[in-house]
Amino acid sequence: MHYLNSSDIRSSVDRRAFLTALAALGGAGVLRGLPSFAADQVGPDAKLLKSIREKGVNFLKTTQSDDGSWTSATQPGITAMSCFGLVSAGVKVDDPTLQKGLKHLLGYLQKDGGIYHPETNHKNYETSLTLLALSGANSDGRYTAQIKGGEKFLRVLQWDETESVDKSHPNFGGGGYGKSQRPDLSNTSFLLDALKAAGVKSDDPAMKNALIFVSRCQNLESEFNTTEFAAKVNDGGFYYTPAAGGASMAGKNADGGLRSYASMTYAGLKSMLYAGLTKDDKRVKAALDWLRKFYSVEQNPGLDQQGLYYYYHTFAKSLTTLEADLFEDAKGEKHDWRKELTDALAKRQKDNGSWVNAADRWMEGDPNLTTAYALMALKYCDPK
């Protein structure tokens, strides 16, 4: 794989500036005999990116309820996503819409430090997403206390010895929905996003414990994964959970193997990188091999259009974490993924500025949720 790093970009900008200055000083003759340099910029057209972001922001500003929520006053997860989407698009912390949304979320602050509806089964999900929104709006430190309280709560919620499970148990290290009584990779990924946003380092015990669970969600038999599912597919991709009998949203093979799909594979890759694994680790290599085979901005490979906007956000955040400006697929084609993703989202945006998924699984038929996901993805698409 070819990775274009920041020094490559800076040097190409410096060369162009140098050549421009020479031309201004001495005319074209000064340049005669010097090598020519192509523009090395990667990423989308800046005007297009700005335009679709603004349209998405304006849409969310028109759909906020009087109480500060989006979609549901009793499901703070969607409101947290909407707030984080606005922050991701560059909306200032004192913007009235954003402040109204954050105030609504803080109305769910609990004594244990979590931020969730008191009757919810989604304590991890709601708290993690709210911490992302608060962290994004915390440039002046106004939400530091709430972020630290939420971080402490998530640590308690994570499956570990405090739930009477040791490191050999398939639940160990993960986060999940309370109603399911077992962790899953999606919740674990959001938990790690929130911890990282709160400043937790890769060598922290919570990160290392999560890595144990994440490794067991990968279709890769190794010393890190000896579950009953490890060798049945063995393609390096990831699935939803190995716990409680195992589950993949892409279904099972006849032998019980859990099929890999792209949104979970990007989530798994990102989570492993957060926990300190490098590109040389066998788990990272196997995940990248799978993703090279199934690179796409038109579908969520393994699930087609289902979960597409969740996929877009996870795709963009993972490739940013990987520091990949160009992503080379299995056929050797190098993809300017920021440009390709921005163009795909521009094509799918509605006239009113929203995005919506006709494959309405996991609530992606809700334009508030999908617009938030799109803005969260576009956060990582600035030209380089």
Image (cartoon, helix red, strand yellow):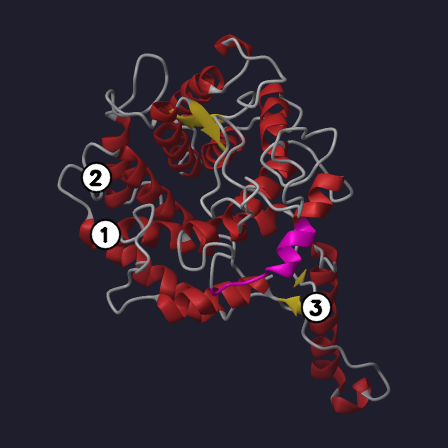
Pick whichever of labels 2 and 3 is earlier in the sequence: 2
Rounded to the nearest whole Å, what is the CA distance between mark 2 and mark 3? Answer: 45 Å
Q: Give the residue type that dot 2 points to.
A: Ser
Query: Where 216 falls versus 373 (above or below)?
Result: above
**Which disc is residue 61 wearing?**
1
* Residue 89 appears in the picture as rendered: no
Asked if disc 3 and disc 1 are in contact, CB closer than 8 Å, the reply is no
Q: Please tell me whether mark 2 or mark 1 is closer to you in this view.
A: 2
**Please, what secondary structure does the residue beneath circle 1 have?**
helix
Q: Which residue does the image show at 63% across and 68% down from the upper left?
A: 41
Q: Amino acid at mark 3?
A: Lys
Query: What SS does tag 2 mark?
Result: loop
Q: Residue at x 63, y 18 (%)?
A: 168
**In this orientation, which residue lies closer to the viewer: 27 or 216?**
216
Secondary structure under badge 3? loop
Residue 50 in the image: above or below residue 271? below
Q: Which residue is mark 3?
A: 331
**Other-residue count near label 1 (Cα within 10 Å), few / some / many at <14 / 14–19 / ≥20:** some
N-terminal label among 2 and 1:
1
Q: Residue at x 40, y 68 (%)?
A: 346
Q: Nearer the viewer, mark 3 or mark 1?
A: 3
Q: Residue furthest right?
A: 33
Image quadrant holding the C terminus, namely bottom right
Closer to viewer: mark 2 or mark 3: 3
Start and end of the magenta stretch?
288-298
Q: Magenta stretch containing residue 245, yes or no?
A: no
Q: Position of residue 5 (x, y in %)?
A: 71, 56
